[in-house]
Amino acid sequence: MNSYAPKVLIMYASYGDGHYQASKALEAGFHKSGVSDVVLLDLMAEAHPLLNEMTKFVYMQSFKTMPLLYGWVYNATKDMPPDTSLLNVLNSLGMRKMQQTIFSMEPDIIIHTFPQLAMPKLLKKTGLTLPLINIVTDFDLHARWVHPDVNRYYVATEDLKKEAENRGIPAEKVFVSGIPLKPDFDSDPQPSASLPCELDPSRKTILLMAGAFGVMQGIRGICAALTDSKEHQVIAVCGRNKELYRKLQAALGHRPNFHLFGYVSEIAQLMQLSNCIVTKPGGITLSESLVSRLPIFIYRPVPGQELNNALYLESKGIASIAYDADTLITQIGALLSDEEQLAQIHKEIDHLRKPGAAELIVSDIMEQWFAPQRDPGCPVVM
């Protein structure tokens, strides 16, 4: 345990499940290091609950009804300078709640797993000095993450570090850590009684994840086609979408090579049981897949950060992108029958995967700001 245990405030958002999962992974990492005073804050939900629910609804609907518009807005604003009017407005949201939290909790460090950067303006307003940390939870860098007053960025890849440097972020502020994942992914997952999954060892196992809210389209047809093959078995995870679970259970529940789950926390175990994954390309799930050494199939990625995530991993030879079910099923069948290609993908994954990211980030933060020989608030000069 460190001689100085800081108070840590981790800020996230509930757009999807990834930002919260990254925050919980960091919280677990701090607890493991002996830091018990860790608070997680969903700033928009606490400061502007009605606006938060409205924007969440719009965000979720964008995947179904407005993907091209969402992607256009994302890419049009991707390289904005941090002092633009739009970013100033977005970064002002939640300032009053942040000020109340800062004065009541008196944290020693602020960590963002979502780019809601009210803190730089608040620090200037109050005259406080606190280290600000950004954990970039995608394989793509949007302007909302970038601010000159952020002290340190933790990113997934060397390529992302280079992109950050090209945006004017000093190299010493950017640390290639990987994306923080739950502790399950840092060790060999143990079998769980809550996962009654009797798999046939003679079949290749395909894990299909619809996302935390079950938003992937066309799942029933894909699962039906994949389980038509005697060579494959499918584990389908519906997240919190109870209607999707009910429909899949009714249509395919009788098939012995089809295994259905709702929302599960034992994702590491399911990935360990699988030979590949079909998923929407959120940063957390992609990182979990890489750590688990799973070839990735991405179906109809939404323009914006998810498509950019998908294109990046495709460029590395790790992911395949499909926009129709026939192409997806052909891609999966071809790869699972080609042991040489599987071995090559595993080799590419090993170049990119970053296990233990949460522990690495916590260790670096403690060393940079809270080492026993240093006063809090004084980072190491690199």
Image (cartoon, rainbow, N blue to C red):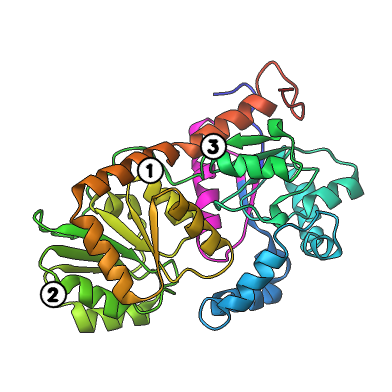
Mark 1–mark 3 Cα distance, whole angstroms, equals 15 Å
Earlier sequence position, callout 1 versus callout 2 = 2
Q: Position of residue 94 (x, y in %)?
A: 77, 62
> Residue 306, percent across and down?
52, 63
Residue extending furthest toward the top: 373
x then y, percent, for residue 359: 50, 34
Residue 140 shows up from this direction? yes
Instruction: Give the structural element (helix, strand or loop) at label 3.
Output: loop
Q: Element type at marker 1?
A: helix
- State which region is magenta: 9-38
Q: Residue at x 46, y 52 (%)?
A: 315
Which residue type carries mark 3? Ser
Q: Residue at x 85, y 46 (%)?
A: 123
Q: Could you tell me which secondary element the residue under label 2 belongs to? A: loop
Q: Position of residue 132 (x, y in %)?
A: 73, 42
Residue type for callout 2: Arg
Q: Which residue is mark 2?
A: 255
Q: Looking at numbered disc 1 in the image, what kind of residue is underneath it? A: Ile
Q: Residues within 10 Å of mark 3 (few under 14, many from 20)?
A: many
> Considering depth in this image, is 261 or 153 the residue closer to the camera?
153
Picture quarter with the C terminus: top right
Q: Image quarter for residue 27?
A: top right
| Mark 1 and mark 2: Cα distance apart in space | 32 Å
Q: Residues within 10 Å of mark 1 (few under 14, many from 20)?
A: many
Residue at 19 percent of width and 79 percent of height: 252
What's the distance in space between the residues labelled 3 and 2, CA to CA? 42 Å
**Does the image show residue 195?**
no
Is 317 inside the magenta-drawn segment?
Answer: no
Question: Pointer 3: what residue?
Answer: 177
Q: Is residue 379 above or below residue 145?
A: above
User: Observer-nearest residue: 164 or 250?
Assistant: 164
Tell me the residue that label 1 is attached to. 349
